[in-house]
Amino acid sequence: MKTKNQSLFQKELLLEALKQSFVKLNPVSLFRNPIMFTVEIGTAVMLGVCLWILTGETAQGSFAYNFTVFLILLFTLLFANFAEAIAEARGKAQADSLRKTREETPAKKIEQVGELYVNEITIVPSSSLKKGDLFICEAGDIIPTDGEIVEGLATIDESAITGESAPVIREAGGDKSSVTGGTKVLSDKIKVKVTAEPGESFLDKMIALVEGASRQKTPNEIALTILLAGFTLVFIIVCVTLKPFADYAQIPITIAAFISLFVCLIPTTIGGLLSAIGIAGMDRALRANVITKSGKAVETAGDIDVLLLDKTGTITIGNRKATHFHPINGLHETDFIKACVLSSLADETPEGKSIVELAGKELTQNLSIKGATLIQFTAETRCSGVNLPDSTRIRKGAFDAIRKLSETAGFPFPKEISDAVTKISGNGGTPLVVAQNEKIIGVIELQDIIKTGISERFERLRKMGVKTVMVTGDNPLTAKFIAEKAGVDDFIAEAKPEDKMNYIKAEQQRGKLVAMMGDGTNDAPALAQADVGVAMNSGTQAAKEAGNMVDLDNDPTKLIEIVEIGKQLLMTRGTLTTFSIANDVAKYFAIIPALFITAIPALQGLNIMKLHSPETAILSAVIFNAVIIPFLIPLALKGVAYKPIGASALLRRNLLIYGLGGILVPFIGIKLIDMMVALFF
Amino acid sequence: MMNTEIIGIIAMFAITLVAALPLGKYIAKVYSGQRTFLDPVFNPIEKLFFKSSGIDATKEMNWKQHMIALLAINVVWFVLGMAVLLCQGWLPLNPDQNPNMTPDLAFNTIISFLVNCNLQHYSGETGVSYLSQLFLMFLQFVSAGIGLAAAAVLFNALKERTTEKLGNFYNYFIKSCTRILLPISVITAVILLWNGTPMTFNGKDTMTTLQGDTVQVSTGPAAAFVAIKHVGTNGGGFFGANSAHPFENPNYVTNMTEMVAQMIIPFAMIFALGFYLNRHKLSWMIFSVMTIGFLALAVPTIVTEINGNPAIAEMGINTTQGATEGKETRFGAAASGYWSIATTVISTGSVNSMHDSAMPLSGMNQLLAMMVNCFYGGCGVGILNFYIFIILAVFISGLMVGRTPEFLGKKIEAREMKISMIIALLHPFLILVGTALSTAFPEQGASTLNNPGFHGFSEILYEYTSSAANNGSGFEGLGDNNPWWNITTGIVLLLSRFLPIIGPIAIAGILAAKKHIPESAGTLKTDTATFGLMTFAVIAIIAALSFFPALTLGPIAEYFSMK
């Protein structure tokens, strides 16, 4: 699934795209793109002119010349179609690799009898599952389709989707109740309710977006199309009025020259690449393992002003580290530490390792758990530990889990422990309570570890103009401490779900665009309210419905990538538009002298490129206009690199590269092509 | 000699700039309703006016109501104006017994005065009575006031807030006329009077020339007329020869006065925007872009005119005075070249030399100045035209930095783009289509030309460009008083005046109603040199791309043929 390094043009994709380039010549489909549609009209007219010459017309130049112009125009169209087709093919290939995960699998469907669900299981193909159906998955089963766990708990291998090999726990009722088709149940048994009709899952929606069937133009794309259509209209006026002007000056201009002038002037470069850029943007999102529900969402992501991030897992490593041992009064610290180490020696979790690490080598090297029984952590018990050969039972776990354990055994819960727990929590830490033979002996303090490199990422966001806000259940003091350390701009402490919502609304009131990531059902309203809501794939169905993107990796830092993808999308459009329009300067200097030079020899002075002859000048300009499209396809697909150097500096940089470059490149290109074309004239 | 001429030009520019700064501050105060030193004079007059007309000047309007008010004022004066011109022969104040105007000429004349163009297909001496002249003078206040009031609506809409209420149009209009145009016109008229411009209601004067014969010389209430003609960037001359006429522009001092008078309000409006919004850097950005554009046109023109005509030099004739054909010796080649660009970048269109006689490159620059039509631009409307280009530049550069484009905290979306594109398209459309029709039907348009070939083509192109830019200057050299010219240019005038006012105001009105987005680090600043460069590039490319082929067949072909 993780195929980020795949080359831009794979052979099988190329063949498919080539085929599509011809299919897309159909005027009905080309009509969606007004610029290329006018080129198609021009091409048709040139074909007519060629036929006309064959019937004996002599004033329009040689057949060979006219036919060459016709061919070049046809290639211009094909190149533009190819750009769109290759973008689609790449997106489709990406989507297909996702779709492969959901091939036909047998599903253990629970048959409905009357009003009641009866546990009668029939094996049906996954494609026949309807929304609302229930099915069962046991250890070793492939989950047949997307759904929500209604009963049970299971460990699931989601590597088919996320590429992460570590299994995850999904259970009914919580924020992690969603399962995805194609993933594999490793342990336990779950009852799942189907959440989408066949063909209507998020993935299906995304595939449809990429394939163009339901691709809608985004608001920015519409505005840009208006701009480009405007430019096209200007040049229609310029070319149409040129006819009476030339007649008045008694200068004959051939139809081929008129159409060449027109096609060169209208912004075909950006016109041909526009839809490819849009598709490539969604494709980049898909490559980042983000499913977007609309192209608009990707675009909006580029405009985000405020980013709401959960503390845990985003800013801090989900796993905390042991920083202090707090033994109960009367117990020697060394004994307590020994017990902690014994319980953690076989514990492979980062927390467990960090306890051994904190205890130090001197204490740990003499300890052994030979012959002991290990008690693994389960989602059910929420504690782990060890049963030593001398029948000492050591358990460590969440405060309430150990408390329950201890109270069940008849021990009172010591007040000093609850005090310690409160204090640790107050400092932004997590308490891990330890019990020996069900009697509580102390607390291990775990602290949040801020992810390495996260503050650099926030710095990058700040330079982009994005404000970061940390959302945490911690008290304000701890929250402030972590916020400052991590370098976020603001934080919401002791956050309740409605606090997120209120914060988003307040920012939106001030005209800001807000993005957030969430997974729980109680996040759903905020996800819906946010301008960009990214739901984790592991999250509840409600959350996934509410957001406008789904992150398959469940990686909360993904928002940063999404923002950059959005910005890249707009930038690629903007820079290629500038490039395309700047190109016209050189094309004018190639074609205008060529049009008039025979009748007004003095205009040789305008032929600053010293092109060979009027015919070669026109052909060179049209050839340049055509070949620049395939040259720019890689840029359109990969996107212009975003650099967070401030808006004005970025504008200067892009203006220099694509504006000035757009003026100079065609002068060089047309001159070179002319030198080659001149060999045939 | 040449040095003095250059110093004269620099002085004209410097005086305008120095005077425009405090004037801009004053204009900003007028439109924001703050106290000014002229309050005691004008408060009672305005109160009386509003009371007698029943207009509630405090009632706030949205952009549509503004535009309805604007059109209503224009319709009223159009009807009255037609009546006066069609019946001037029967009406009083007609000592020279000039006849009634023909309907097509009256249509063209009234339209062209209402739209701040003043194309003038008649000659003031024989074509109009003094009553008509006075009426036309009044219209020059109206049209300039309309332009200023529209700009005031734009200023109001650009404020950082979300609203539909953009002030009262009648209030802006009256204040523009009374508090801005009138005082400056009075000062200008007084200077002109001192220097010999006539101000009389008597008929023709009889004069004895140096040769001893007597001639009849037209006079009239010219000083007042000439003042508002420049202050309001109208350009409609009292006499046919406009500011080349010795009564309209007697000497170098009046030449400078008229020059400063026509540029001062366009300059001041740019600074007024800065004072009004408290965004001085934005003003300077706009001023710099406009000035660079102006200099890029003016400097080559002045140089070409000073160098003189190589074809004449070849004949062995001394051209050290520069290209003097069609120029007044009391102004000289440099000041005439400067004037020809100044009067075309702003929409005055008054002339102190014959543009038809200018060198081909100068002619091209005069054309380009009007094709761009927003380097300073006319009274109020210059800044409206520039606003369209800002919107386009903001859109493209917004995309280039990866952010939905926004200007002064308002997002630019499809609807605004649609309007800006229509307005940006309209100008080349009117010019090119008008010219194309006149060349396609030579029996109508082209047959009236005095010159064949490229120069004749330039004359047609100039006539439509001047109309579409609401400029009103003439390349001349064509017999423009016939139904074809009167009606086609009349239509061009109407479309090119009102749509380019309504468009920007509509955009500003729509944006004003949108949610205001505070600036952040990711916002593209629009008051920087980089953005200025972007705007300049957009203007240059749109003008160059639209008009390059037409210019090639006119002045460019002429230029290369002369080499």
Image (cartoon, rainbow, N blue to C red):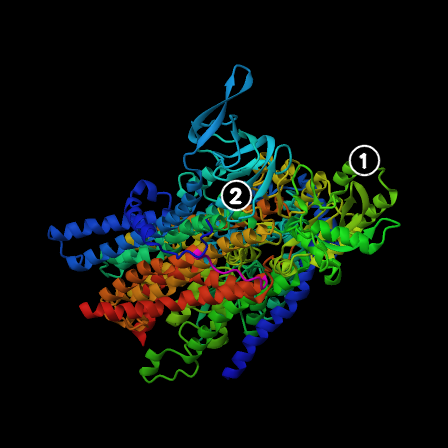
Q: CA distance from mark 2 to mark 1?
A: 37 Å
Q: Is residue B419 left or right of residue A246?
A: right
The answer to whether B423 appears left or right of B547 in the picture is: right
Q: Which residues are magenta?
A: A638-646
User: Which residue occupies the foreground of this view, B27 or A311?
Assistant: A311
* Residue closest to the eye, A380 or B327: A380
Q: In the rendered structure, which amino acid carries the disc numbered 2?
A: Glu
Q: Nearer the viewer, residue A223 or A205?
A: A205
Q: Are marks 2 and 1 in contact (CB under 8 Å)?
A: no
Dominant secondary structure of the residues highlighted in magenta in the image? loop
Q: Is-magenta flag for residue A566?
A: no
Report whether B15 appears left or right of A340: left
**Front: mark 2 or 1:** 1
Image coordinates for residue B501, horizontal then vertical, percent: 53, 50
Image quadrant containing the C terminus of chain B: bottom left
The image position of residue A372, as x and y in percent, is 68, 47
The residue that mark 1 highlights is A407
